[in-house]
Amino acid sequence: MSPTILHADMNACYASIEQARNPALRGKAMAVCGSVEARNGIILAKSQEAKIQGVKTGEAIWEAQQKCPGLLLVPADFSLYLAYSKMAHHIYLDYTNRVEAFGMDECWLDVTGTDRLFGDGETLARTLRRRFRDELEVTISVGISDNKFFAKLGSDYKKPDAQTRIDRSNYKEVAWPLPTSDLLFCGPQTTRKLARFGIHTIGDLARSDPEFIRKLLGINGYRLWLAANGRDRTPVAPYDFRPPIKSLGCGTTFRRDLVNRDEVALSLRRLAKEVEGKLLSAGLSASRLSLSVRDNTLFQMGDDLPLPYPTQNAQDLADRALDIFDGFWFWKHRVRAMTLRASRLLPQPKAVQRAFFPDYPAHEKKEDLSRALFAIRSRFGSKSVDFAALYGYDYADLDRDRADMPTNKFVACAR
Ligand SMILES: [Mg+2]
């Protein structure tokens, strides 16, 4: 059975949602923007009426107002958009559990084999469009295909509130004349490289030699070649799928620049504590650690080192981080920001040949202590127990996003 894959894209997402919520904005030239005062004073989305007058996403507010003097501006309300995104997912989930989100306003749906229940892909696309109009008062454009690339291409092909089928019966007529840059993951750099060899359209790409494309662009280029030929077979992930974690980290810009190694060491302890918490929550151990440091001229450098044992505990992470720091930092400038990142993650605990590693028992002790502290913090709050060295630490406010309140302070110490 040939797969049926839909790609649905909410049209002018933020602007449509604002219009759905506030009838006074409907039929008007309006745009959603970042704040006017702050640096992000740009247009994030515009209504159809504003689009006609030349307003573009990403341009500065003053530019948009010159083109469209009566433009109504609405500040972005991301929690509202997120709520709509969730509502959209719930509509899709009525038809399949294979719903893969791509950003806030786009999703792939694998509806293979649901014809008898919901009709063919085209029928289901019409049903979805009607439900979005009726239930959410926003419109979607839908691409219908047998693969993810052409489904996405179809949802871009005609909008708003439209649907386009691009599958093996018509892709040479519909997809091949389009520029390569219309293809998903064909960014500006790839487009330029292809253009240098006279490959301008998806059809040009499809007809070129796959070995040549692979040499030019690597494996991702070969994937694009497959896609251009309608031969992409990437599956649509189930809705509850979470990709495995590759790395965990924590970074901060300090309240004031750090001026000496002691301050850096202490700050690394503090960052390591955050990373430790994330590792323990995820049940993972790190076998590699990287540190990146930005100085007060905003110059950035970094390095990474393996950890002697797969590690979760903040002490070992901080010690290793300081080794990395000492390896590349020469105090030409003060330290403004640091990011600590753990990678090569392994499920804990891993069996270790203890006899080979004389200092392993000491390491194990620290891991046990970490887990014990983590258990206490999980129950009584992140500030319930800590190392004396970090008492009163205030170079960075890493707790500001935490909801839990400080409780009584205990001090632990590992030997
Ligand atoms: Mg969209």
Image (spheres, rainbow, N blue to C red):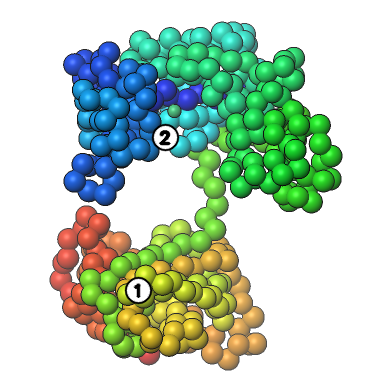
Mark 2 closeness class: few <14, some 14–19, many ≥20 residues within 10 Å: some
Kindly identify the amino acid type of the residue bearing the numbered disc 1: Thr
Residue 284 in picture, x, y percent from top left: 50, 63
Residue depicted at 43% across the width and 71% down the height:
300
Mark 1 closeness class: few <14, some 14–19, many ≥20 residues within 10 Å: few
SS at circle 1: loop
SS at circle 2: loop
Residue depicted at 58% across the width and 66% down the height:
344
Residue 323 in picture, x, y percent from top left: 47, 85
Placement of 258 over or under 218, stated as above or below = below
For the N terminus, give its image quadrant.
Answer: top right
Kindly identify the amino acid type of the residue bearing the numbered disc 2: Met
Labels 1 and 2: the sequence-earlier one: 2
**In the rendering, which numbered label is found on residue 128?**
none
* Residue topped by disc 1: 297
Q: Is residue 253 left or right of residue 200?
A: left
Q: Is residue 374 visible from the viewing direction of this image?
A: no
Q: Nearer the viewer, residue 29 or 243?
A: 29
Placement of 214 over or under 312, stated as above or below = above
Residue depicted at 61% across the width and 18% down the height:
144
State yes or no: discs 1 and 2 in contact (Cβ < 8 Å).
Answer: no
Find ligand 1 in the image and state its quadrant: top left
* Residue topped by disc 2: 104
Viewer-nearest of discs 1 and 2: 1
Placement of 379 over or under 112, stated as above or below = below
Q: What number of labels is visible?
A: 2
Q: Is residue 253 visible from the viewing direction of this image?
A: yes
Q: Quadrant of residue 173?
A: top right
Q: Nearer the viewer, residue 364 or 255?
A: 255
